[in-house]
């Protein structure tokens, strides 16, 4: 939906093997900001449409789409400011050039713990383990808000079922290894997810439907 030409079909051309990880975004603002919570963000955006700015890692990124979904869910207009990466966007947020940002939990936690950023809510349907005290946006009153990013393994369409099952089992075994968990969870800010190929297939179908609707409703043009 975000690109005018894509040389593959994300469902037809692949067979899901295994989801591996998931990570959430956390909606943050500068600790000294007059915005103290999600209600303040919504009220300010309604009072001055477009005045609330939010940074992202670039067009079409998960935190860009999270901002678009927040605007749609709250019937407000927010101004998207794309950057070429998280570090530049976070630097401008800390410098007071941005109002808010959906940042990854792993990069925001040190700034939150240091008292430089205030966390309002996480973007996923359930709380982040690294920020268990921070509510989800659904808990904060934004019904149906659920955006997270995942990584997983797929194989070419037509891969025999016994191979898919063997790969699924070996990937799950690898994800349980302490050194792998250390790299993914502690250093990478991910949460490990294991399950059957059918679980991963269902997630892909659900995400495709929700993102197609979001991109259409937000009138985001294909690039």
Image (cartoon, rainbow, N blue to C red):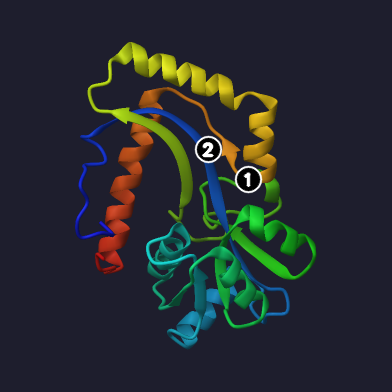
Alpha-carbon neighbours of circle 2 within 10 Å: few (<14), some, or many (≥20)?
some
Residue closest to the eye, 199 or 126? 199
Q: Is residue 216 left or right of residue 111?
A: left
Q: Is residue 132 visible?
A: no
Residue closest to the eye, 141 or 184? 184
Measuring from the top left, give residue 44's x and y in whole percent: 53, 82
Please give the label number shown on residue 144.
none
What element does badge 1 sit on? loop
Measuring from the top left, give residue 6's x and y in whole percent: 22, 51
Q: Is residue 23 above or below residue 163?
A: below
Q: Is residue 12 above or below residue 110?
A: above
Marks 1 and 2 sit apart, C-alpha to C-alpha, by: 10 Å
Residue 116 falls in image quadrant: bottom right
Q: Which residue is mark 1?
A: 188
Q: How many marks?
A: 2
Measuring from the top left, give residue 93's x and y in whole percent: 62, 75
Q: Which residue is mark 2?
A: 21
Disc 1 and disc 2 in contact, CB within 8 angstroms: yes
Q: Is residue 223 above or below residue 166?
A: below
What element does badge 2 sit on? strand
Which quadrant does the C terminus fall into? bottom left
Residue closest to the eye, 68 or 42? 68
Q: Is residue 204 left or right of residue 101?
A: left
What residue is shown at x 28% (from left), y 47% (from top)? Answer: 209
What residue is shown at x 20% (from left), y 35% (from top)? Answer: 12
Q: Is residue 197 left or right of residue 37?
A: left
What residue is shown at x 78% (from left), y 68% (from top)? Answer: 115
Measuring from the top left, give residue 94's x and y in whole percent: 67, 75
Q: Earlier in the sequence, mark 1 or mark 2?
A: 2
């Amino acid at each position: 939906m975000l690109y005018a030409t894509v040389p593959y079909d994300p469902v037809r051309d692949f067979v899901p093997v295994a989801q591996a990880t998931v990570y959430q975004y956390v909606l943050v603002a500068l600790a000294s900001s007059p915005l103290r919570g999600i209600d303040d963000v919504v009220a300010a955006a309604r009072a001055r449409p477009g005045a609330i700015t939010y940074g992202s890692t670039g067009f079409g990124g998960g935190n860009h789409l999270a901002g678009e979904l927040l605007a749609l869910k709250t019937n407000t207009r927010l101004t998207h400011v794309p950057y070429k990466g998280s570090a530049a966007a976070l630097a401008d947020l800390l410098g007071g050039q941005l109002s808010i940002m959906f940042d990854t939990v792993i990069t925001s936690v040190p700034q939150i713990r240091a008292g430089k950023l205030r966390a309002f809510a996480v973007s996923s349907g359930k709380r982040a383990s690294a920020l268990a005290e921070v509510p989800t946006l659904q808990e904060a009153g934004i019904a149906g808000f659920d955006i997270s990013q995942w990584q997983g393994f797929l194989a070419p369409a037509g891969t025999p079922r016994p191979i898919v099952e063997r790969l699924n089992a070996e990937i799950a075994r690898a994800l349980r290894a302490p050194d792998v968990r250390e790299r993914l969870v502690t250093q990478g800010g991910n949460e490990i997810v294991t399950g059957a190929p059918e679980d991963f297939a269902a997630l892909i179908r659900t995400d495709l439907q929700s993102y197609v609707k979001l991109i259409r409703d937000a009138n985001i043009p294909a690039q």
